[in-house]
Image (spheres, grey):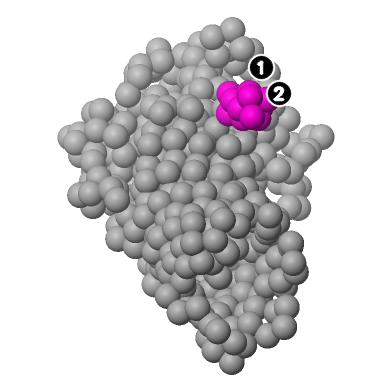
Amino acid sequence: MNRTLGLLFVILILGFASCSPVTLVKPLEKNQKAVTASLGGPMIVYSDLPIPIPFCNAGFSYGINSRVTASAQLGLTSLAFGVFQLDPGILYGIQMPENNNQIGVSAFGKTHFMFDKWEGNFRWYPELGIQTYKEWGKNLAYLGASGWFETRYPAEQRAAGNVWVPMLNFGYTRQNTKWNLTAEAKWIAPNISKEDIVVDFIGPGTHGALGLYFGLVRKF
Amino acid sequence: MKQLSILFLITVLTSCLRLDSNLFNPEEKITAYQLDDYKGERECPDLPAQFHIPDSLIYLFQLESDNNGDKARIWCIYLGDKDRISEDTVILYCHGNKNHMDNYWNRARLLANVNGKNRYGVLMMDYRGFGLSDGTPTENNMYADVETCIKWLKNNGIRDGNLMVYGYSLGSAPAIKLSVKNSGVPISKLILEAPYGNAQTMVEDAAKLSLPSSYYTNVKVNNAEEIKKVTVPFCWFHGANDEFLSMPVHGKKVYDNYQGPYKEAHIVEGAIHNNLPSVMGYEEYLLNVGRFIRQ
């Protein structure tokens, strides 16, 4: 009956949804710049159709050196709802592959800052992640894990009692000289039940949601 | 850069997308109420014929609802003898967020038969934007619409002590609100079925993080807090398997926070959000509602 109540009540559920794709898993070259854009989100059932929540982000990245890339992303969908969301972060190359036979490993740390114009509510959530990737030719495939961390304590002040929201992801990037195109799938919050809530998230079993994302990188 | 900053500022200041409208799902558009003849999805679809309401006890009418100058025509149905409201006990039924009175017609029929054949009057309405009612559904409009119905009952002579309010799901918000606020006729007893705690709980329950509801909606419904002000007896029904508004997350919070003189709970195993009376059994359901109203 009221299954549709939320329906889109949650179209902007950032906890599940603002987890933007990892558009960069391999650090940029020193002093290299890139503009990034991404679209996608968790899959939900909307009007009986499975769709990804259309979150849109835009960002900028800069190679501080060959191992460290700084970036910041702005949530455009959030902005349309009067929520300013900025996600600055650092990507660090732990293991830089010297040839195509080696696997690269990188780690990132981000903080998701949010602030709404309606009531001035501010939230921030750190995110940590690690990615492994393999290149062949112009192709790059990656596999990783990350997690958002709750910052509101004590738990009694929150309805959601989760300390962290983990994610597992894998993706594919087509790398050109100037452009990268990425498609990524995520299993969001595999430790958290998606039953008995106002949104019909799609995902395997009773826990977590499946997310689909597409990313675009323009390097300078 | 300056132009970019201005563009950004304009975007922030003019952004106005909210999810409020998604709280209300009138969905199906109709041209007339069909009641017994309605073929679409409805509550209590297998209601036995014994709960039939004769045409002479069905009064379909319109009221003008006024929310601080924002006026709209809303449609209502009264089940019972309109000319005997001054002698009757009346249940004011506030329906859920989906569709219109045709969907809830069987529920109204059921309630009219609490404690005996066509024993109680039942009044329900389509909030603005629902069914054939004009206007836009908003939280405050919904309160105004229900309050308008209470005033109609007062104008038709209902006596103090004879008005019960029953709120289902979304309808729990006006039911609680108007149990606290005296709109001309005091509410004697409050019955809630599958109430929700508050907008914040709903957001966090779905987000899994402590995101504030203000990021998505202007709706301020906070039943879990508002119930603390209720001083009339309270009866709570909830499906133990409610897949939409989880019983322990939403309903129990409302129930636990009630601080009035009397409360009772009916958790129905196997029932989900929209089938509680049939899972509980219609007779058993009527027995429980009836006992609560009589005592």
As drawn, the residue found furthest toward the top would be B69
Quarter holding residue B59: top right
- Asked if one can make out residue A145 in the rendered structure from this viewpoint, the answer is no
Residue of label 2:
B134
Q: Secondary structure at mark 1?
A: strand
Task: Please tell me which residue is depicted at 47% across the width and 27% down the height of the picture.
Answer: A118
Label annotation for residue A57: none
Quarter holding residue B124: top right
User: In this picture, which residue range is highlighted in magenta?
Assistant: B1-14
**What subunit carries mark 1?**
B
Q: Where the C terminus of chain B falls, by quadrant?
A: top left
Q: Main secondary structure of the magenta part?
A: helix
How far across and how far down the image is residue A47, in percent?
70, 55
Task: Please tell me which residue is depicted at 40% across the width and 40% down the height of the picture.
Answer: B212
Is residue B220 or residue B245 the one in the foreground?
Answer: B220
Q: Where the N terminus of chain B falls, by quadrant?
A: top right
How far across and how far down the image is residue A127, in percent?
40, 59
Is residue B147 or residue A51 the one in the foreground?
Answer: A51
Is B163 displayed left or right of B38 in the figure? left
How far across and how far down the image is residue A109, in percent?
40, 60
**Amino acid residing under circle 1:** Ala
Tell whether label 1 touches label 2 (CB within 8 Å): yes
- Asked if one can make out residue A184 in the rendered structure from this viewpoint, the answer is yes
As drawn, the residue found furthest toward the right would be B31
**What subunit carries mark 2?**
B
**Amino acid residing under circle 2:** Asp
Q: Secondary structure at mark 2?
A: loop
Question: Where is A16 relative to B154, above or below?
Answer: below
